[in-house]
Image (cartoon, helix red, strand yellow):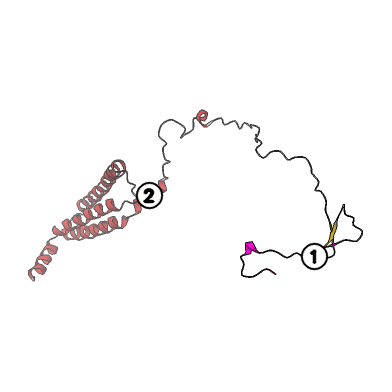
Amino acid sequence: MADQQTPWAERTVEVPPQRQAPGADDAQTAVVGESGGVFQRGVAPVGRAAPPRTAEFTAPHEPTGTGWPAEAGGPGWSDGPVQSPRPPLSYHLAQLRRGGEWSVLGGLFAFVCWGVWAISARGNLGSPVLTFVLTMLVGVGLFALCRVIGRVVLERQLGRVRRSARAAHMVTGAYLIVVGFAYLRQTEWVVSAWNWVAGWF
């Protein structure tokens, strides 16, 4: 048995002694193994030679009728720069919604302040309603202007990608809050209440 201390690659395997099968001559020696089977020396059959592995594989051409891309004249095969596909409308709408809470907050504040001012005026509500609608339209125009400026400056000049409309919503919300305070400054009882509270400090 091989020594257990020697490395595996240097170990030798002990083969049990072989005995010659009865009736075997010297020309064809048969060996009997431990299981009793008879093994004979011989020559392996040789068949045809396999084709060389470096043979070139060619497939027949099957026309599909579409032609080469340059012949098809499809998009992206011109010599000019490749245009990236435009995102769908749902992507742009989702982008416009991000940050919308700022505009909603400013709009609610302006609406409440406008309501206080309109009720305090105690007159015809036609003029105050028209004033509020014009104020909201100016807010929408300011939002659109911020988006256009962001597109020109951020996307075209700086090459950045805008992922939301948060900045435009913040500017619009700030505008509407300032408008709300302007409505409150035109309300007499709010101004006198503010002066009374400020007189304590």
Q: Residue at position x 83%, y 53% from top?
A: 41
Q: Position of residue 172 (x, y in %)?
A: 25, 52
Amino acid type at image mark 1: Pro
Along the line of sight, which residue is nearer the eye, 98 or 57?
57
Q: Secondary structure at mark 2?
A: helix
Q: Secondary structure at mark 1?
A: loop
Reading the image, the residue beneath label 2 is 93
Segment colored magenta: 1-24
Q: Mark 2 touching mark 1, by CB under 8 A?
A: no
The quarter in which the N terminus is drawn is bottom right
Residue 7 part of the magenta-drawn span = yes
Labels 2, 1: front one: 1
Residue 79 part of the magenta-drawn span = no
Reading the image, the residue beneath label 1 is 17
Q: Is residue 46 left or right of residue 81?
A: right
Q: Residue at position x 41%, y 37% from top?
A: 83
How many marks do you count on the picture? 2
Q: Residue at position x 52%, y 32% from top?
A: 69
